[in-house]
Amino acid sequence: MATSRRRRDSGRFARRKPARAPRRRLLGMLGVLGVLGALASSGREAAAGLDAAEIESGRIVHLLGRAAFGPTPELVREVRSLGRSAWLARQIAPEAIADPDLDRRLARYPSLSMDYRDLIENYPRREPGEPQQGLGRPQRIVLENQAALLTRAVHARAQLREVMTDFWFNHFNVFAAEGAMPYLTTAYLRDAIRPRVFGRFEDLLRATAESPAMLYYLDNRLSQRARRGRGTGLNENYARELLELHTLGVEGGYGQADVVEVARAFTGWTITPPETAGPLGFLFRALWHEPGDKVVLGTVVPGGGKDEGDRILRLLAGHPSTARHLATKLVTRLVSDSPSEALIVQARDTYLATDGDLGATVLSILEAKEFYARAHRRTKVKSPLEAVASAIRAAGGEVRLGVEAARLVGDLGQGLLLSQPPTGWSEVASDIVSAGGMVSRFELAYRVASGSVEGVDVDASTWERIVAVWGAPALASYLLGRAPGPDTLAALEMARRDGASGTLLAALVLASPEFQQQ
Amino acid sequence: MVRKLTRRQVLHGGGAAVLAAGLAPFFGLRRAGASAVRRVLVAIFQRGAVDGLNMVVPHGEPTYYSLRPTIAIQPPGSEGGALDLDGDFGLHPSMSALLPSWQAGELAIVHACGSHDPTRSHFDAQDYMETGLPGDGATEGWLARHLRSSANGGALRAVSLTGSIPRVLAGAVEVYAAPSLTDLTLGRSTEAAIARTALERMYGPRSDLLGVTVRDTLANFDVFSALDREVYRPANGAVYPAGELGTQLREVAQVLKADLGVEVAFLDVEGWDTHANQGGSAGELANRLRNLADALAAFRLDLGESMAEVSVLTMSEFGRTAAENGTRGTDHGHGTAMLLLGGTVRGGRVYGAWPGLRSAELYEGRDLAVTTDFRSLFAEVAVRHLGNPDVASVFPGFAWDPTSRLGVVV
């Protein structure tokens, strides 16, 4: 599944439903165009004399490229009226953000709220007369999960929670399409990751350590002490990635002996066998556990069953190497592919001072003065998810069914939930950009602008009207949230003179370097 | 949006005409300025650390069987036993498609090969193998340095069938990376020409990664879009196995036959990180090895006589523990086996000093030791097969001595 990026059989699931009338945003956008059109027409020469409103507008657009999946005219207005700090304060308390429209959209994916047993035994339900198919069709569960992630990225009001869910899922990556993983990933995202992205890191770490998804993916479910002369019984996979990827980082100061000790401490952390009655979930099997003290990073962890693993997680979560590793990754995601030492130190110190409070740590980055530095503006190439979600958001698209749109994320090179190695997908441009990938981005731009992504409604007639009344530069400013650079402006005007339609111009804006970066 | 772009801007002069007319005779068509023979390297990275001891089985070593009570490949002649190569080593039984190459002397194996760096991190070890600089934080790949030090004016010398330019080619300018080379159709729009001109205008002046990549994309677009995957027919009845590797090697064969000047093709194949239930003569690892062997055998058959100038090199970041672990798999180890297949290979031999598997012989008491630095193999391929004139610049800090080389390349 990870490798078949090109086509997948969506079957009945992707069958087109009768289209609702596309949302009309033309009236709403005219007010915005007033401001942006002026910005565009004044061009770069205005840069020296931007007024306060324009400077603030630029900051908001920058913030929404990092703390959200791109600006929309509505969201820019909302942030401007609330103020950036107040908006951020609301974003890191997402439970208070009611979002009935999102709930309605997500209701299309019944598997999202199901527990393991429901998924395994009852989903998807067979139609009467349909032959039995073993455990069902787990691919559908993955497709629903992907579609829901994409739908949330585009439409959720709690945008920063979606950004951080993407970040932390990737940090604690699992591969959703192998073995039992399709059945385990739904709850992993829903119960382990998403509710904890602004909580304490230790809680998130423990939730992943005890999650059936992680126990399955990194094999710890099988790891046990040696018995009856059966080899060592150990499996080091989770222990190594716990140290290298989840906490300390590869330079974090551990050795092979630590990996083995941690693996020994986590023996017996497993999953309830599917055939037992009752809910599936985490199980500590004392019989599988390697008894005795363990020594990890020079610290003696007294033999004590499951408590050893808990102590190690606490030790790792509070370790300075972990603080630095996480701070570096967060600053890379939120600010720059070449993160500055000052911002890393600030985030690290916040993390250590707040006992690993992830909301506070993220805020320390997003509210830093340096966050808005000119050197960081429009410098990060959008990840595939960011590219797809932001294009649909910019075009005012409505995701009725997110399966096809989610597939496009895979076409751009980073299939949702489908990174096979435990590193997850890379965040930096040099790993994201390729010739083939740019072709896919251009194609995506055209499909979004022309409203030809299945399941996503876009009113493509809007573009010609905007161009006819306001001109190509105004269309660019509308879709970008800011004025394009001179090369893109020249390209658009040249294309218009050569007879490009409004739809093609909109596609070119979405294909432009300004749109590919945030 | 720019599907079926005009072909007027073909960079590789005459290329489009050749392609439009079908497939040129492989390498028969000499390009202006090209040297007499162009050698090709196809490098395949087995991501995740392949279990070299089950891929190339040391069946002559009794310790192998005591270390691996449930996953060992039985000796030749047994049910599901290894395919004997030389009395000491045997191929995994699912790799029988490669036996004809072995018997024809086109397939060589270098065992106990790898990096002397102690890391057991996949990601560090992959970086080290790709940069050719173990323990170093370098970012430039050894194949990129090879291309630079053997510059010949070609604009498209390397292709990588990956989602981005891999570390091994990072720093090279003559490289094109895409998961599929021929499935490159851009937009169906009649406005394609307008779109292309606009994209050139938008990205052309930029010197950043996006600008460079898009210029590269547009420059190579015509070349690749003329190759139609649907109409390609492998030669000699070759049948590539289903799956990504087979599909991609088929594309590599197609691109090589089209004579575009490509000298290096790089591919990734994932899924070798077999920590649990890896199986023995059948099972998960067996299936992956079969897929690899079948794909390589199809590629060899498809290229036919052209294989005289082509080598396929497999590599993996490290090996796996000599003993099976408690979950019928293997954990991260050290030395592994690498394959070299092609017409310039002195095949039919297992190269490298065998370090043994007894406890005292194992690296850190648990892993197959490394007796051949991977750079010895890579450097020999770069010099002897690809004709690189300056190997010191390809593997800085590594003293490659031609007089004590492996001898795996003719």
Image: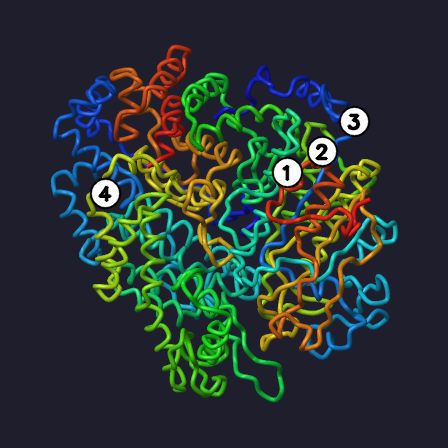
Disc number lying in front (2 or 3): 3
Identify the amino acid type marked 4. Glu
Q: Let me know if residue A18 appears in the view.
A: no
Q: Mark 2 points at which residue?
A: B256
Cβ–Cβ under 8 Å for marks 3 and 4: no
Chain of the residue where label 1 is placed in the rendered structure: B
Q: Which of marks 1 and 2 is in front?
A: 1
> Mark 4 falls on what kind of element?
helix
Task: Check disc 3 and report its element: helix, strand or loop.
Answer: loop
Distance of label 1 from label 4 (alpha carbons): 40 Å
At which x and y percent is residue B210? 44, 31
Q: Residues within 10 Å of mark 2 (few under 14, many from 20)?
A: many
Callout 4: chain:
A
* Residue B339, image x, y percentages: 73, 53
Query: Which residue carries the number 3 mark?
Result: B36
Asked if the residues shown at circle 2 and circle 4 are in contact, with their CB atoms under 8 angstroms apart, the answer is no
Residue A353 falls in image quadrant: bottom left
- Reading the image, the residue beneath label 1 is B146
Cβ atoms under marks 1 and 4 closer than 8 Å:
no
Identify the residue at image location x=42%, y=74%.
A280
Q: Which amino acid does label 3 sit on?
A: Ala
Q: Work out whether disc 3 and disc 4 sit on a shared chain.
A: no
Q: State which chain disc 3 sits on.
A: B
Marks 2,3: beta carbons within 8 A: no
Q: Which chain carries label 2?
A: B
Query: Whole-Å distance between the Cαs marked 2 and 4?
Result: 50 Å
- Name the mark nearer the viewer: 2 or 4: 4
Is B211 displayed left or right of B379 in the figure?
left
Q: Which amino acid does label 2 sit on?
A: Leu
As drawn, the residue found furthest toward the top would be: A497
In the picture of the structure, the residue carrying the numbered disc 4 is A370
